[in-house]
Image (cartoon, grey):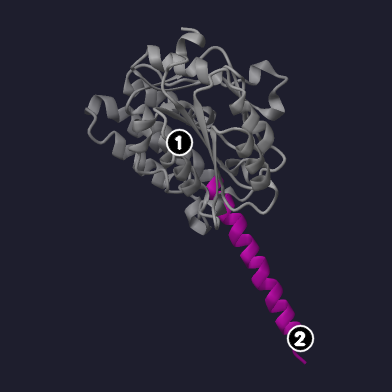
Amino acid sequence: MNVSEMKNQPLVSVGMPVYNSETTIENAILSILNQDYKSIELIISDNSSTDKTAEICRKFANLDARIKFVRQDSNIGPTANFEYVLTSSSGKYFMWAAGDDTRSSGFISANLEALLENPNYIASTSPNIFDKDVNFENKEVRISLLGNRKSRFKQFLNDPHQTHGLFYSLVRIESLRECPWIRDLIFGWDWAIVLYLANQGEINRTKSEVIVFGTAGFSRQNNIYLAHGLTGFKRIIPFSIFSKRVLGLIRTWPKNESFHIYLEVIWLNLKTLPLGYRLIRYFLGNVKKMIKAKLIALLGSRP
């Protein structure tokens, strides 16, 4: 099916939650507006940015009627902003787009075609790469989640750090709207949502097109643990809530399907223990140094 044959197909909604993206937002918006599939709406929610993001978005909204722009009165948090653009969408298909990401012009048409022709696909995306790696073809990520649900979960848990692009798939919107976790900011938040979708159907990866991810996003912040409320000893098992979500998804599976997934989830947590232990030791070491310095200062100040 080519683009001309799809011109009467349902509306595709693109939700773009943004915050302080003045240096990248223009290219992100243009990559959506310049898609060869034109039946789209772009919902942009500025999370009370302190830079010129809102000004740039308003400029585009005044030029293209397909854009719905809202500036939040105060910062509502990243996940609530993602939820806001989803609930504000009216299309039959939906995808999130970050304010520092760009897509090739055929991204929507290629993935919409895949969904239209394959009812077993719950979502579809294209190969992805980070902007710093665009000159290296071998850096493209092409992981998909196909086959039965056990196979899909095993594919994901085999290397979850390579599944970022699946979160930004084109999705059948009703399936995503039923997810109860979108507002909950947990460590592995996007992973949980991807597995929620994978529990319902396959997530495809096209051979053509590409999505380029910026390297300054929320999940790549230096204080990522603090941003997720993981302080002190909570850092030892950061995936505890994520694991609970996954185990809840497979609770009703037959034992022969779920047993291997249980083991994979346990292994994921065990792999993070050494890192968490080092972080706690580093934290306690700094506390010890601070207390020692204060004691020395206090004793040294006495006559």
Question: Mark 2 belongs to which amino acid?
Answer: Ser
Disc with the residue nearer the chain's start (2 vs 1): 1
Q: Tell me the element at label 1.
A: helix
Where on the picture, by quarter, is residue 139?
A: top right
Residue 285 on the magenta span: yes
Q: Nearer the viewer, residue 186 or 104?
A: 104
Residue 175, given in percent of the width and then of the height, sits at 34, 31
Where residue 191 is drawn, which disc sits there? 1
Where residue 301 is drawn, which disc sits there? 2
Where on the picture, by quarter, is residue 298?
A: bottom right
Where on the picture, by quarter, is residue 176?
A: top left
> Do we see residue 112 in this rendering?
yes
Residue 170, given in percent of the width and then of the height, sits at 46, 25
Question: Mark 1 belongs to which amino acid?
Answer: Trp
Where residue 276 is drawn, which disc sits there? none
Q: Which residues are magenta?
A: 275-303
Q: Nearer the viewer, residue 283 or 212?
A: 212
Residue at x 64%, y 47% (from the top left corner): 54
